[in-house]
Amino acid sequence: MLSSSGGGSKIRLIGRRMFIISAAKAIVVFSVVGRLISLQINESKKYKTLSDKNRFREWKFAPPRGVIKDYFGNEIASNKQVYQLHLIPENAENLNSLIFRLKNILKLSDKAIFKIERKISSQKPWDPVIISDNLTWSEFSRINLFLHELQGVEPIVSVARIYHEDSSAHVIGYVSKISKRDLQKKEYLRDMRAAGIRVGKTGLENKLDSDMIGNVGHKRYEVNAFGKRIKEVSIDQGKIGKSFRTTLDLELQKLSSELLKGKAGSVCVMDIYRGDIIAMVSSPSYDPNKFVHGINNKDWKELINHRDKPLINKAISGLYPPGSTIKTIVAISALENDITNTKTTHRCTGSIELYGEKFHCWKKKGHGIVDMRKAIKESCDIYFYEVARKLGIDRLSVTAKEFGLGKLMVDGFVEEKRGVVPNTKWKREKIGKSWYLGETLHSGIGQGYWQTTPLQLCLMNAQVANGGYEIKPRLVLNKEKDFVSLEQFVEDKKNFTDDTGFLSDIYSNFRYKALFKNQENINFVKEALYGATNEPGGTSYGSRLPKEFIYAGKTGTSQVRKFTQRQRELEIKNEDLPYEQRDHALFVAFAPYKDPRYSISVVVEHGGSGSKSAAPIAKKVIKKLLERHTFREKMFNEGKDI
């Protein structure tokens, strides 16, 4: 029999335990209720989003890229319809079997299959994998024929870049697949990893890429628990890339390319007042279309192993000694620095000897007594040795830089090179040696350390032709005119009074800077260049044009090797030497001679003398250019180039 005290303690113990159990239950219930409240109220948005992610899938796609046109509206780079094949791995019942089936239908190589499998393993199973981005119609038809057997495969009609002219391959550039380097350098690409998107690699395609690439579009689908599409929910077409009109003349590009066929070199043409680059051709060229979908190994090896380096844009990346084309700048610099005058004469006997070194003229028996005009007209080396010796390399360097040498010409072209305008400071810093007088003499005829691009030579000559005013080269037409008309320019020249060397502003942020102290010095050189092309004895007299196409120009021949005395005595012809030892041929000109409007430079690698190889090309380009001049001006005056 239990005592009353013992029974009471048991009841209290049971009561405490029941209380603890009840409290625990209450805590659990309140926790569950609290969590439910939290999930339904506080975190409902989060889980709704996660649910929607499982319920909806989004596929990105690239919009059409902006079109690039020439000055007259002709398309140079545009887009074409292409057939693609996409694979969504999670929609395939048996992925390995599907890939094997596609291999047989499309005759895919083992290497291509390896790349596809590697891409599948590196991304999410619902992201599409491009099996091919450029199917032929026959391949596209076969896929559609067997489509009912190919679960997870989607044939797509899309767009891809197409280039209409190889003649503009270097200046326009090309597009290709996005690389890791592209993602690092171009931040705007990080949100554009769309299927099939292409990015500009060189030329204008690279420079204008962020504008031309547009905004990526997307399609949104509702999917079931297995990831299969049930219906299309929404579609965003994205934004088509911005199109651009260039200053180029496609007809002139084609002609220049044809004239350079079989040669390595460049042709550049520029408006001497507006800075418009009307032609910029590099030879040999290549087919940029091969890069759009990925160039094959055979074509790539042919390009990189080619003797004449077709991938290099020789107009802005090719570096050449300017040869005798630099003599116009030597003459202007000497006159501007009061080192000599136009009447000073020197006797040319074919060579001179200074400090134990013999310096030769290109004309073995010499030119006799020559003044500055005759020296420019007949390109007398001895005369310019003497002028350069008195002038000095540092003053010549200053003038050369003012006229555009040693500078980048076109913004945003990663492949462009500055070249070299030598002086005493440059040699100390780059070579660690002092400058020698003999090097000044060689520099006076465009040899030695000089390194210039064809576009730099074209700009140099343009600024001589326009009377000595600085201009800025450009390739793309802007919405607002950032230049002045020829008539306004001529009128403003009358008002040139300020000591700073600037004309009054015509449009905001646009000025013409004078590169001279006495414009008569520029005018004298221009008149001497007339003689070089249009008077007997002139170095380009053989390439003159009839009255309605008269132009003025300067030939140049730049050596790539040093002659020995024995070689001079043997009188070995340039064409008898190995190709890589032959001289480069150069020519610069402006046209027409009266009221000039255009500057041209021609470089033919290892082409021999400028008069034989470069000037005849320039002659044909100038004729075509002047024939099209009226059409171009009509568009400008009607405001069709804004």
Image (tube, rainbow, N blue to C red):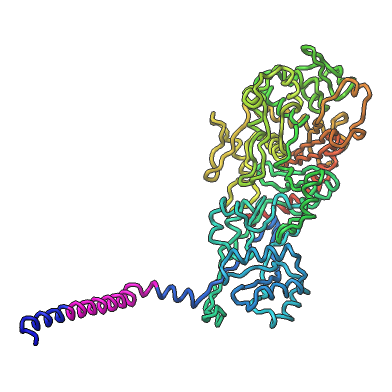
Asked if the stretch drawn in magenta spans residue 31, the answer is yes
Q: Looking at the rendering, which quadrant does residue 606 occupy? A: top right
Residue shown at 62%/41% (left/top)? 472
Q: Quick check: 338 above or below 91?
A: above
Name the quadrant of the C terminus: bottom right
User: Is any part of residue 170 visible from this angle?
Assistant: yes
Q: On the picture, is 440 further left or further right than 537?
A: left
Q: Residue at x 59, y 65 (%)?
A: 194
* Quarter-of-image position of residue 401: top right
Left or right of 124? Residue 377 is right
Looking at the rendered structure, the number of numbered marks drawn on it comes to 0
Q: Looking at the image, is 328 positioned above or below residue 565?
A: below
Where residue 525 appears, as percent x and y from the top left, is 73, 29
Q: Is residue 389 left or right of residue 29?
A: right
Residue extending farthest to the right is 570
Q: Is residue 625 shown in magenta?
A: no
Query: Image point 66% across, 70% down: which residue?
Result: 158
Residue drawn where x is 73% and y is 45% of the image: 312
* Residue 237 seen in the current view: no
| Residue 335 image point, x, y percent | 68, 22
Residue 367 lies in what quarter of the image?
top right
* Residue closest to the eye, 85 or 467: 85
**Camera-nearest residue between 97 and 47:** 97
Relative depth, front residue between 112 and 592: 112
The furthest residue to the top: 355
Judge by depth and name the residue closer to the eye, 246 or 563.
563
Relative image position of residue 477 (x, y in whole percent):
63, 52
**Secondary structure, magenta segment, majority class:** helix
154 up-or-down from 386: above or below = below
Residue placed farthest to the bottom in the image? 1
Which quadrant, please, contains the N terminus? bottom left
- Which stretch did the figure color magenta? 17-46
